[in-house]
Image (spheres, grey):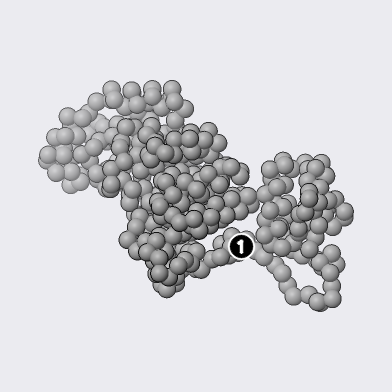
Amino acid sequence: MKELIYWLWLMSLEKVSIKQKNLLLEQFISPEEIFSLSPEALAKTKVLDQSTVNYFCQSRSLEKAKQDLSYLDKNNIQLIPRGAPEFPVALTNLYMPPLGLYARGNLSLLHAPLSIAIIGSRNPSVAGEKYAKLFSQSLSAVGVTIVSGLADGIDGKSHWSSVNELGSTIGVLGTGIDICYPRVNKKLFERMADKALIITEFNLGEKPLPYHFPQRNRIISGLSQGVLVIEARRKSGSLITVNHALEQGKNIYVIPGDIGGANWAGGNQLLKEGAKLVTEPRDILEDYIIFDRSAQNQNETRDQRTLKMATPEEQLLFDLIKKGYRTIDELVACTGLPINRINSLLTMMEIEEIIMIKYGNIALI
């Protein structure tokens, strides 16, 4: 609790840049040690000029930090400082890592085994909305965590489709965590705070300033193994996220669009530059999940083949279905797995074209 007070104090110093804060943290053990530095010691760091040193010394008070901590406690908001076990390791490797994250919701999603960012236009076409819903729902159904910026348009559609599936979605804000922006997403904001996860590096009360959004985009890509672009203009926030992702060595996926449409021009350009063209969720999943479909005698039926499943749980379901278990209730009873996990595995097996489900009955293809 005492340590968080000093993190809140350091994060709230408005006239000290995040770069300067990071440089100070490289030289000193903790925010508490930084708080206690004399003006002479600060000047010797060569990180702050004299006017900033003066501001720093004038701001050496913990009262606001204590008030903020009280607000966090009352509103079920957690502060995750860098170095805490919950803080994602991937974010510590960023060029300009956040000092900490304010969070509401399920913190385990920060360590999800596979996260994919979905980004795109704030004013998408009907086709763009359809693809956002299809991909986010299908990926979420097989356990992928969807990361986006909780903006209107593609972001919002992706979050809604994921939270209505398994709830595995993370919204990264460009404001303080006590501010919902845009207001049209208020219902989604509250739903995600309850069932999924909302995070931000910006302090309480910070408004949606223009420079906040490019800054938050590095966190969207940083949390993800890959970035899916749906309907983006040539000059857009989506391409800023892509640039961050490329610097971080992440995979870039693009759904192709109308070659004459301005809203699709950015994504189509990325395809020219080497991004992976995708037309179905499997195109993304195959980069992370092993699909072993060795050529077999064409006269063999699927039931006669020995297939290597992606996971032991899939293999268990495959073996049970092969033995004649045909309903979800039967699989739940035999495996002891939760029904939502069974549904996720079956959806994955459908995408892999191992099974088909019709009127509640499951059959091998």
Instruction: Answer with left or right where residue 168 lies relative to residue 102.
Output: right
Q: Give the quarter of the image for residue 49.
A: top left
Q: Compared to 347, does 268 lie above or below?
A: below
- The answer to whether residue 247 shows anywhere in this view is no
Residue situated in front as seen by the camera: 122 or 328: 122
Residue at x 59%, y 50% (from the top left corner): 137
Q: Say which residue appears at 58% left-offset and 42% top-offset.
A: 164
The quarter of the rendered structure image containing the C terminus is bottom right
**Quarter of the image containing the N terminus?**
top left
Q: Which residue is mark 1?
A: 282
Residue pictured at 74% horizontal, 75% vertical: 295
Between 146 and 132, which is closer to the camera in this rendering? Answer: 132
Q: Is residue 81 above or below residue 264?
A: above
Amino acid type at mark 1: Arg
For this orientation, the residue located farthest to the left is: 50
**How many other residues sit within 10 Å of disc 1, few (<14), some (14-19) or many (≥20)?**
some
Q: How many numbered markers are drawn?
A: 1
Closer-to-camera residue (27/351): 351
Give percent across and percent down for residue 216: 36, 48
Point 44% across, 54% down: residue: 124
Q: Left or right? Give the position of 171 relative to 42.
A: right
Residue 191 image position (x, y, % from top left): 52, 35
| Residue 42, image x, y percentages | 19, 39
Spot occupied by residue 172 in the image (x, y as percentages of width and height): 42, 44
